[in-house]
Amino acid sequence: MLRLAHTSDLHIDERGRLDDVQHVLRAFIEGGRRAAVDLFVVAGDFFERRSTPTERNALADFLKAATEVAPVVGSKGNHDVAGDLELFNRLKTKHPIHIEERATAQPGSAYMVDLAGGRRVGVLGMAWIDKANFVSGLDASVDQEQTRYMTIESMRDLLTCLRAEARRVRSVGAAPILVTHVMLGGSVVSTGQVLIGIGLELSPSDLKDIDASYVACGHIHASQEWFGGRVAYSGSPARHTYGESEAKGWRLVTLEDDGRFVSNEFMELPARRIVLLEEDWTNPIARAVGLCVDPIEVAGALVRVRYHIRPQDLHLVNEEVLSRAILADGAHEVQLECVIEAETRVRAGEIVLARSTAEKVDAYLSAKQIEIDAATRVRVHAKLAEIEGGTHAAL
C-alpha cells in the first residue's frame, strides 16, 4: 500500500500566528509518522506573501523534519511569490523535496519519487494559474470574448497534457498523483458560502478526468472531497481567520502499489479553538450586566465577541477595556465585532387615524406623553387652522 499525507495553505507568516502554524505542522509530521506515510504532499500557499528570513527558516525547519519521515512534494499557491520556493528543493535532507512552481505540461516532466520496495510515484504539478498574468501576455487587439475563448482553450490543452503525462507515468509502473493549487467551482468556504465564478476556475470533473490516482488540491481552507475522495481539498492545518470554525486537519490517502485508489480519511489536528460570544446589548439590563466570560471556556482560545447595540449607546462600550479583560481571563486573541441595530419607529395608530392636523398633533402629544394646558392647546389649534387656511387660499 502507498500512503500519502496531504495538507495545504500553511500561510507561514511571522506577523500572524506563526507559533500556531508550527504547532500543527509538528502534529502533522507526527501523524504522518504514526501512519507510516510514504509521501508528504503540500498543495500550495506555503507563505502568506513574499517570504522573510524568519518565515523561510520556519518552512525549512518543517521540511527538514518531514523528510526525516518521507519525501515531500508540493506546488506553488497564489500567495507564494515566484522564485520563493525553488530554493527549498536544494536543501540537504534525508529524503528529497520537490516543490513545483509551474505546470507539468511537457512529456516526461512528472517528478518521479522512488520508494521502498521498488514502488514509485509520479508527481504531476499544476501550480496556481493567474488569469491576469495570462491575459497580460495577449495582444491589445484581443477583445474580451476572444480572451475568454483563448483562456478556455489553453486550460483544455493543459489538462490534455496532464492526462497524457499521467498515462505515461502509469506505463512505467508508477502511481500518478496531481498536486495543484486551484479554484474548483462549487467549493464551499469556511463560512458555508459556495463559490461560483471566482477567477479562473476548473470543475472537480476536469481534474478527475486527468486520471491521476489522487488529486491533492489547495486554496480553499475548508476540507472537502469529491468522487469518494479521489479529488480533495485538505483544508488549512491552522485557523487563519476568525471565520474558520471548522475542524482542521489533513488527508491520509491510501493507494494500492499500482496506484489504484483505496481510501481518503480526514485526520484532525490540534488547531487553536475559536470561541464565539454573542451579546445583545440593545437590552439596557443585559448591557448593564456586561459580558460574562468563563475563563475555562476562553483559556488559550481565539475569542470572537459579537455585540449588538443601538447607535445611541455606542459611547457606553470601551472596546479596549473589554479586550484587556478577556485577555486577562486567558484568551489568546480577541476580535470585537459591533453590530449596530437601527431602531424602526412606528407611528402611533391614533396619528394614522386622525383626520385633521389638530387631531394628529393631539395624538402625537399623547403618544409622547407631553402634557399642555387647555389654553395652549386652543392657541395651537388656532395657529394650525390659520396655517391650513392660508395654504388652502394659496391653492
Image (cartoon, grey):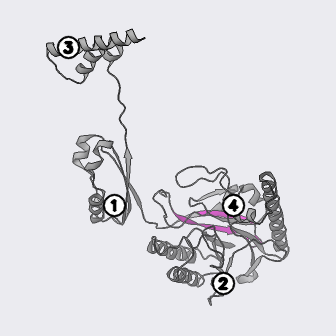
Position of the C terminus, as image quadrant, is top left
- Residue at x 28%, y 40% (from the top left corner): 283
Determine which residue is flagged by label 1.
298
Q: Which mark is residue 89?
A: 2
Taking 218 as reference, is 153 left or right?
Answer: right
Q: Which residues are magenta?
A: 247-265
- Point out residue 54 in the picture as x, y percentages from the top left corner: 49, 82
Taking 331 as reference, is 118 left or right?
Answer: right
- Point out residue 261 in the picture as x, y percentages from the top left corner: 72, 64
- Upstream in the sequence, badge 4 or badge 1? 4
Q: Is residue 309 above or below residue 63?
A: above
Is residue 354 in sight in this rendering? Answer: no
Q: Mark 4 and mark 1: span between their CA atoms?
A: 36 Å
Cβ atoms under marks 3 and 4 closer than 8 Å: no
- Upstream in the sequence, badge 2 or badge 4? 2
Q: Residues within 10 Å of mark 2 (few under 14, many from 20)?
A: some
Determine which residue is flagged by label 3.
379
Determine which residue is flagged by label 4.
231
Q: Which mark is residue 395?
A: none
